[in-house]
Image: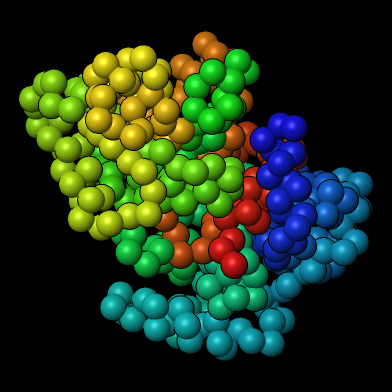
Amino acid sequence: MSLINSIKNNAREKLRNIVLPECEDERVLKAAQQVLEDKTANIILIGNEETIKANAQKCEANIDGAKIVDPKKFENIDTYVNELVELRKSKGLTKEEATQIMTNEPRFFGCMMVRLKDADGLVAGSNSPTADVLRAAIQVIKTAPGINTVSSTFIMETKDKEFGENGLILFADCAVLPDPNAEQLADIAASTAATAKNVVGLDPKVAMLSFSTMGSAKHPLVSKVQDAVSILKERNVDFKFDGEMQADAAIIPAIGAKKAPESSVAGNANVLVFPDLQSGNIGYKLVQRFAKADAHGPIVQGLAKPVNDLSRGCSVEDIANLVAITATQVED
């Protein structure tokens, strides 16, 4: 069974309520139909009901079964507005400004639904920049307890199944944070371990990558990764991790045994935390192309509740798949 089919089966069991706020995009409406047919989530669409239904009819999308919520007619809008005012009081947000945002910014309204438990997660970005999606998520939902860093991961599904866990290996961060410090690297490791466990069903084995293995080189860039490892030890996290180590030591047992014989992760890592965004982004794209691997993501992580961002060039299938992934990120 492919990874995405496994994730969809998991999503069917959980059947979470996922918000799709960008209903002006026909791909979103067609994806809503696909999700409803696949029964991987309950769908909430944001906007004017007549307009959404007319757009769905125009693009031949059957959205029967989706819940449509119009912020301008929403009976609990005052609760949402007051919550946003409270969240942004340090920025001086007025009630009038909050009302304008809640009734006219579907991504903010959708995130507030998630925050206040009227929904379980949100998927957006097909019709808006990543910055707009993450701004709403960070301002409304905030980061998870003990985590101060929003990051991302790609689940790499390789064909030959030689590396990681039966060919599955997570790369982070590949899309969000350009130059993380040691504390942020530790956050990325913790968030990606949670994604590996909750979404993929793996027992996380996290390798903190560098051009050095266990002190074989000295440089400030190496020290940053070493400091991140020390922070994880201080936090007493509940997953296996080690580093700093080179990529070959992380994923090839013979090299791991030679370069880091005392490590419980070296040679068997299924989560790779890159030292910066450049290396992570380059790394996942090389593996995707050279190894013809499927790259599932980016999956946003580190938020208190799941919100995921789509590429504006995404397909209907991409949206439906990300809805299923988002559903599996919801904690019980």
In this picture the colour scheme is rainbow
Q: Residue sitting at 55 percent across and 13 percent down? A: 291
Q: How many marks?
A: 0
Percent from the top left, x then y, of residue 104?
A: 59, 69
**Between 287 and 98, the one nearer to me in the picture:** 287
| Up/down of 121 relative to 260, above or below | below
Q: Is residue 276 visible to us here? A: no
Q: Residue sitting at 61 percent across and 84 percent down? A: 77
Quadrant where the N terminus lies?
Answer: top right
Q: Quadrant of residue 117?
A: bottom right
Q: Is residue 65 left or right of residue 312?
A: right
Percent from the top left, x then y, of residue 179?
A: 25, 38
Quadrant where the C terminus lies?
Answer: bottom right
| Up/down of 224 relative to 232, above or below | above
Q: Residue sitting at 57 percent across and 88 percent down? A: 78
Q: Is residue 209 left or right of residue 221?
A: right
Percent from the top left, x then y, of residue 92?
A: 31, 79
**Between 257 and 155, the one nearer to me in the picture:** 257
Residue furthest top in the image: 290
Q: Is residue 31 visible to us here? A: yes
Q: Residue sitting at 49 percent across and 27 percent down? A: 164
Percent from the top left, x then y, of residue 295?
A: 57, 29
Q: Quadrant of residue 120?
A: bottom right
